[in-house]
């Protein structure tokens, strides 16, 4: 489950390129645009500007470059020309990118136009929860430490953590071992070792944690119709802590605050 130094260098490059995809998205006006249009723009950017491959396209028979999960959609939302983003929506874009045979994975929840305070708070707490988990990453720590930190922060703020989906090892394949649960008990689970590369990607619901999959076989929604948010980064375990391979430029201050490796 650990990667060689030369593999980590290649994963670092994939992560850097994927971070630039989100910086591209940051510059788009999302109100009134369809999720399919966003998918097309992202795919073109990855292929033509970055000379890389959208790794999700063709994986498990999926036809698109991104997942676009709006409001009560927890994950795996399918881009559609009929799915027009409206003022007040929240939407998670989950994107994978392969360069030189190695894959990076990241997601970000965007606030579309003017969003209600309750939805803003959900997105903020979810983002914080992801970083709470990242902060626990170090050689010698346990997987349960990550999940415990995430769930504790969510519950303290009145939210629930989805348990059906988890983070995962990543490298030449999109989904590798270990599985990274977003709930758990401290001091339990697999011990982390330097060179492990995996994602941390909590999905946090405004209401109950129960989810269901819609008839398309992909789209996962909250059973109670409440909002859901998600953030994700690809992480490498270092000798002294963690390094975020998909770190965006606007997150440098956060990485310094948590004393993460550069």
Image (cartoon, rainbow, N blue to C red):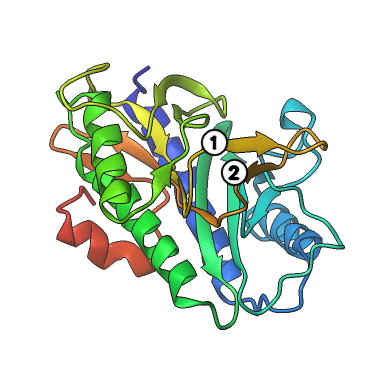
Q: Callout 2: few (<14), some (14-19), or many (20+) C-alpha neighbours within 10 Å?
A: many
Residues at marks 2 and 1, CA–CA distance in whole angstroms: 7 Å
Q: Residue 16: where, in percent of width, then height?
A: 45, 52
Q: Residue 30: where, in percent of width, then height?
A: 67, 75
Residue 247: give its label. none
Residue at x 44%, y 26% (from the top left corner): 169
Residue at x 24%, y 52% (from the top left corner): 262
Disc 1 element:
strand
| Label 2 sits on residue | 96
State left or right for residue 31 relative to residue 193. Answer: right
On screen, 195 above or below 44? above
Q: Are marks 2 and 1 in contact (CB under 8 Å)?
A: yes
State left or right for residue 260 relative to residue 164. Answer: left
Residue at x 49%, y 21% (from the top left corner): 176
Occupied quadrant, residue 197: top left
Residue at x 30%, y 56% (from the top left corner): 157
On screen, 150 above or below 195? below
Q: Residue 238: where, in percent of width, then height?
A: 21, 34
Looking at the figure, which quarter contains the N terminus? top left
Question: Which is nearer the eye, 85 or 59?
Answer: 85
């Amino acid at each position: 489950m650990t990667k060689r130094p030369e593999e980590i260098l290649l994963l670092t490059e994939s992560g850097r390129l994927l971070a630039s995809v989100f910086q591209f998205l940051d510059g788009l006006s999302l109100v009134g645009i369809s999720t399919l249009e966003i998918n097309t723009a992202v795919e073109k950017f990855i292929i033509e500007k970055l000379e890389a491959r959208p790794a999700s396209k063709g994986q498990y028979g999926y036809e698109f470059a991104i997942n676009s999960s709006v409001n009560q959609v927890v994950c795996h939302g399918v881009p559609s020309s009929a799915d027009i983003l409206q003022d007040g929506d929240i939407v998670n874009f989950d994107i994978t990118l392969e360069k030189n045979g190695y894959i990076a994975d990241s997601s970000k929840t965007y606030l579309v136009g003017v969003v209600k305070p309750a939805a803003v708070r959900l997105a903020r707490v979810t983002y914080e929860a992801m970083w709470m988990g990242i902060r626990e990453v170090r050689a010698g720590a346990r997987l349960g430490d990550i999940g415990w930190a995430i769930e504790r922060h969510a519950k303290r703020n009145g939210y629930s953590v989805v348990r059906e989906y988890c983070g995962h090892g990543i490298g030449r394949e999109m989904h590798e071992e270990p599985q990274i649960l977003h709930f758990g008990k401290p001091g339990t689970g697999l011990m982390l070792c330097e060179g492990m590369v995996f994602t941390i990607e909590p999905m946090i619901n405004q209401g109950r944690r129960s989810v269901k999959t819609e008839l398309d076989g992909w789209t996962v929604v909250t059973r109670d119709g409440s909002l859901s948010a998600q953030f994700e980064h690809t992480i490498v375990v270092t000798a002294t802590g963690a390094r975020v391979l998909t770190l965006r430029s606007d997150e440098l201050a956060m990485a310094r605050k948590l004393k993460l490796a550069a």
